[in-house]
Every structure is written in structure tokens, then in C-alpha cells.
Image (spheres, grey):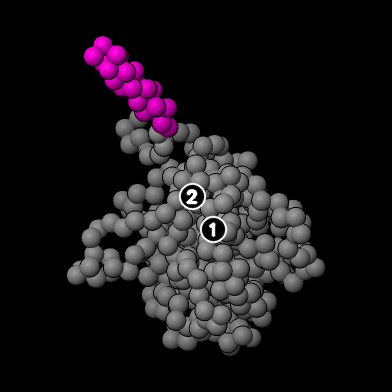
Amino acid sequence: MRLRHAFLAALAACLLVIAGCQTATEHVRIAHYTKYQRPEAGHTAEQDALVNRLCLFGEPTHAPAWPHGPTTEIIRPGYVLENSATDKDPLWVCEHLGEENIGGPLKRPKHEPFAPDPLLVPPHRAELSDYRNSGYDRGHQAPSGDETKDLNRQCDTYYLSNMAPQVGQFNQHSWKNLEDLVRGWAAACGGAYIITGPLFYDPKEDDAKTATGYFKYKTVGRDQVAVPTHLFKIIVLKDKGGQWRSLAFVMENKTYPAQVNYKDYIRSIRWIEDRSGFRFLPGLDKPGNEALRQQLKGQAPADIWPAAGPQ
């Protein structure tokens, strides 16, 4: 009997040790009440110039009371983005496509320089190990193919802060083909402003009969990089008559048929705003811009632009 009791006691002790060895996963949330006040660093004159060049009508802003959590703004010559410390994804990425970056000789690098972003601190960033054997691609938001004239700017697109986990077939075919289409429009019209980003969205929440107020999503890696359910891309440019035009797409992060009818994935910018918690082109909210705001954001176009660009 003593041996039995001793064995049971030893077994209990081992179980406690095993339980104590299990690691907890850390998450991040804003300390709404804090004695620490983060200093407002602001932008340098160079950063202001980049933001003004890359973000048409200003950087996207947070919708009131939308819980995006702690984020970091990253400003580089080819893009401006806001990265989520919670999701380890960019929330949005702004670019300008024009003669300064498209139509050049650079191809996708043979040895692609994927790397964690040195402007972000671990553990609040994605690491290469998070994607390894995850079953998902490191999906560019500002594509490598948008930077074909400057090698440094092309390499900047390979920081993981500019990536989100994407289904391989979607990233390499359906989404890539859309990126090619957008570059064609930009080249035909003398330039375009692009905003791209992940979306976490469940269509059942649009219907009162099926909405639950929550939905599940996946993460990958030790740092729990969030896998978006959808991706969005917003394009704004001036047509050949000098009028602003917009078009936006939302596509599910999944495998698609070989032939995709992109007309089926057109959404209004306002639709994306409502489901992302951002206000895009915020300068349009100023008095006097009501008509242009409605034109660009309020209604999805009835048809997709022709291959040669808006007429």
C-alpha cells in the first residue's frame, strides 16, 4: 500500500511538472488606463513628403471605437503601411504606381530576400519561422512587381510587415493576375494610387438571421500571424479626361478556378470601410468634397475597366 501511495504521489508530481512546462501564448492589448504617455514623434519633412506622394487624400484613419489594437506606421520610399502588433499583418498598404517604379527591367529576384521587419520589435512582428510549413504563402500586399526600377525599393517589399498569409494558388494566380491588371491600368493612365490589405470578415454577419457577433479565423506560427479571410485592393486614378475614377475588389483567401471573372468581386470603397474599420481617402471628408467623396466611395462601378484603362 505504501508503494502504491508513493507511486501515486510521484505520478502527481510528474504531472505537475509537465503542466508547468507548457508554455502560454501571449497576446497584446492596449492599456487604456496607463501612467505612461507615448511621445508623439511625428513625421520628418522627408516622411511627410513620402506620405503625401503615396497616400492619396491622406493616410487611412481608424473608424471611431474600432478595436485595432496597438499598431506601428512604417514609411518607406515605395509604400506606407500600418502594421498590427496583434495580427502581425499590415492593416493597409498605400502605394503610387507610376513611371518612377513600373515598366522597368527588374524581375522578381531569384533568391527572394524575405525578412522580418527591422523597424518592428519581436515578439510583436512576424518571423520567417511563422510561415515555415504553415501551408500559406508570404503574400505581398505591395507587390514586388510594383517596383521594377530600384532594387532597394523592390527589396523593401520583402519585409514581412508587408506580408499576410495567403493560400498558395490564390497568391500565385488569381491575386497575382489582379495585380498585373492593376499595373496595366496604371501604365495606361499615367499612374494610380493603390491601397491593399487583409480583411477579417464573415458574410453571415451581414444577415440578421445568421449573424452571431463573432467569427473564427486561423493563425500560423509561434507568433500567431493572423490569416485573413479576404483581401482587398482599392485603385484610384485619373482617367484620360482628367476625372478621378475608383475601383475596388474584395476576394476570399481561397483557391479559385483557372479563369476568374473579376467583375464578381467589385465592391465599393464604403463597403470595405464598413468591414475593415478604416476610413480611406480621409481628405475627402473635408467640406466641399461631398460630390467627389460620393463618386469615389459611395457606389461600386457597374462594370470593370477595360484592359487599356478607363476611357
What secondary structure characterizes most of the magenta part?
helix
Q: Nearer the viewer, residue 13 or 305?
A: 13
Residue 1: percent from left, percent from top: 23, 14
* Quarter in which the C terminus is drawn: bottom right
Three-letter residue code for mark 1: Tyr
Boundaries of the magenta span:
1-23
Q: Earlier in the sequence, mark 1 or mark 2?
A: 1
| Numbered circle sitting on residue 136 | 1
At numbered mark 1, what does the secondary structure look like: helix, strand or loop?
A: strand
Q: Quadrant of residue 17?
A: top left
At numbered mark 2, what does the secondary structure look like: helix, strand or loop?
A: strand
Q: Is 33 contained in the magenta span?
A: no
What residue is disc 2 on?
Answer: 220
Three-letter residue code for mark 2: Val
Residue located 68% across and 77% down the image: 187
Residue located 26% across and 15% down the image: 5
Q: Quadrant of residue 56?
A: bottom right
Residue 6: percent from left, percent from top: 30, 14
Q: Nearer the viewer, residue 7 or 302?
A: 7
Is there any visible trace of residue 126 in the rendered image?
yes
Residue located 45% across and 77% down the image: 265
Extreme residue in the left direction: 209
Query: Disc 1 and disc 2: Cα gap in Å?
Result: 9 Å
Q: Is 9 drawn above or below residue 176 in the view shown?
A: above
Q: How many marks?
A: 2
* Residues at marks 1 and 2 touching, judged by CB atoms closer than 8 Å: yes
Q: Is 162 drawn above or below residue 20 in the view shown?
A: below
Q: Is 78 drawn above or below residue 35 in the view shown?
A: below
